[in-house]
Amino acid sequence: MGSAKKKGGRKEPLFGLPAALADLRLTAADRIPGGDDKPKKSTGKRKTEPSDDEPPRERKAPAKSSAAKSSGAKRRSRSSISAGLGRLVYWGAVLSLWAVIAVIGVVIWVGAHLPPIQSLEIPKRPPTIQIVGIDGSLLAQRGEMAGANVSLKDLPPYLPRAFIAIEDRRFYSHFGIDPVGILRALVTNVLHRGVSQGGSTLTQQLAKNLFLTQERTMARKLQEAELAIWLERKHSKNEILELYLNRVYFGSGAYGVEAAAQKYFGKPAKNVTIAEAAMLAGLVKSPSRLAPNRNPEGAEARAQVVLAAMADAKFITDAQAQASIGHPSYVVKPVGAGTVNYVADWIGEVLDDLVGQIDDSIKVETTIDPKLQALAETAIIDELAAKSVKFNVSQGALVAMTPDGAVRAMVGGRNYSESQYNRAVTAKRQPGSSFKPFVYLTAMEQGLTPDTIRQDAPIEVKGWRPENYTHEYFGPVTLTQALAMSLNTVAIRLGLEVGPKNVVRTAHRLGIASKLDPNASIALGTSEVSVVELVGAYAPFANGGFAATPHVVTRIRTLDGKLLYMRQPDEHNQVIEPRYVGMMNTMMRETLISGTAKKAEIPGWQAAGKTGTSQDYRDAWFIGYTSNLVTGVWLGNDDNSPTKKATGGGLPVEVWTRFMRAAHEGVQVAALPQSNWGPSNLVQISSQISPPTQVAPGASSAPASNGGYRAPPPTRANVRPEPAAGLDGWLMDRLFGGNR
């Protein structure tokens, strides 16, 4: 029993159905293919496993088992690939559909932010302002500075081809957008790791210039593309190219090939050479940086690139390209001072008051004489170039006008391209002794004459002790001598005698518009004025005593001839009585004959005027006139720093004389109004001069009676001594042996 248990355990006997089924075994042949659990119909034969009495048979797997598995795996793999491809096609179609929807949405969004396409029109060119001289010649342009529209057929064929070669080689084959160009630009930019090439077509550039801003955004690029397609549908290729050439910006304020050709080469676009055409086409890439009048080397290098592109596109021959590169035929107009632009700016400031808002291009006719403008510019620039370092003078201004106020020339600085600040109109500086004629005129009107004697001696006004330049005094002198020698003490006494408020009234009556302080120092020109208003206030001395308003605009018309403005002549408002005009002209002529401005001589002409130098030699002035022109010159520094003793009788007189002598060549000589007043002459003046009174330093003199006037005490810093020169120098040398 024990061994039987160990071998197999006890086996209980079975009876009935369990006994019959005990030895039943199912084989693979008994199973339904495909794994179906339903039993097969019986065939009447049943195979049974061998009985326990028979030796067990070796079981073998069916021969088809591994092949079936391999076949099933292949079927499953093919099925999987097929399913994957199906999914890929499906999702590709879905994504494509969404992409199309997205593109349509973007187009709709871009279109919604544009004006209705059907209402879009090529905008009118912005209005330009043409400023012409008295002879009708063009002086300057303002606004967009656009040239006239030029037709494509009027241009040499190589000019538009230069733009096509460098900007849009496939211009005649694309539909407004060039996919090939975009792809090429994309590849180039990737290789260069930056934006080195653009893919915009000429049509896209035109769309941007006509309708859009210059901002670099994706929205703007999309709008540009949509508008480019619209332009291509509405206009022919040649129309688009013509529009482009007439609207593209070329730098230095020039829009269109005509304006650019005139600006840079001084010729119409139809006459430009191949080299000049290449330079113009090269400017489009970076107009401000490559403008040939500012960066000739950069413009030339870019032009060579354009010439190579033209040759590569077979627009010109290799020989033509090499000839243009090796021997360029263009001559770029140099950047000069361009001082007429100061006039143009002044006109721009008053234009709104004359005609209001400008919607159409206009022509402004002016009083400027181009020849006199060139003379004035040369006089200022050349004198400063020669002597600015010696005298530490960096800037100058000049205004020349007729006695009735018509400005013939205006220079607001030595170089407009460096500084647009107009020192002739905007700047206000102390006029120094050039203000003294208003003091003397007030005295004449109160009964004094050029022969009236006043004392040249030290004076003190509430602690203020003005002095003459040499610290010397001449005792009793005539007013003619005092003005010619620019004696400060006499001017102070005279100003206090007639009243500073009356002096201010006289100056304002003659045309000074600036605020003037009615104190004792007003006689020495301590209140600031502009050059143009001071010259205008001298004009009544040259025209017989009538008010003169400085002006430069005579007529304004549209380009088709419609009159918008015409200046009406000034009313003959007498601001100085003729006899006082004669007195003043007599005295101020002496300034040029023997006084502080004796270098200011115009052969054959009577001329008069007054020099002026402000405190610490900060400003040097000379205002002089004939019956033909009234001209004022100022020299100094913008920061109001002192010069190296530049006086009104020095550089300003030299500039004035150089200009006025040239300006009076060929002009019929005419005398100054009432300039022969009285018997005053040099002999009489010299006979009335006493030897100079030597005054010890710090000594004082009793102040002149001023009728109870108590002006605020100016400081010594407010006083500008006029240098002794001319008459006083001559008299000192002749009468007193040059004792100084």
Image (cartoon, rainbow, N blue to C red):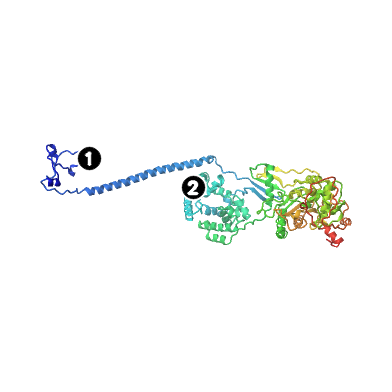
Crowd class of label 2 (few under 14; some 14 to 19; many from 20; radius 10 Å):
some
User: Where residue 101 sits in the image (x, y, percent)?
Assistant: 44, 41
In this picture, residue 152 sits left or right of residue 422: left
User: Of the residues shown, which amino acid type is indicated by label 1?
Assistant: Asp
- In the image, 445: left or right of 341? right
In the displayed structure image, the side of residue 314 where residue 669 appears, left or right: right
Residue 83 x, y percent position in the rendering: 33, 44
Specify whether residue 584 is in view: no
Mark 1 Cα within 10 Å, few/some/many (few <14, many 20+)? few
Quarter residue 575 falls in: top right
Which quarter shows the N terminus?
Answer: top left
Judge left or right: residue 101 versus residue 406. left
Give SS at disc 1.
loop
Looking at the image, is mark 1 or mark 2 earlier in the sequence? Answer: 1
Q: How far apart are marks 1 and 2 (CA)?
A: 68 Å
Query: From this viewpoint, is residue 40 visible?
Result: yes
Above or below, 416 relative to 14: below
The residue tagged with tag 2: helix, strand or loop?
loop
Tell me residue 376's x, y (percent).
72, 54
Task: Find residue 36 and name its label.
Answer: 1
Residue located at (44% from left, 43% from top): 100
- Which residue is farthest left? 53
In front of the other: 661 or 234: 661
Mark number displayed over residue 175: 2
User: Three-letter amino acid code at disc 2?
Assistant: Phe
Dot label at residue 629: none
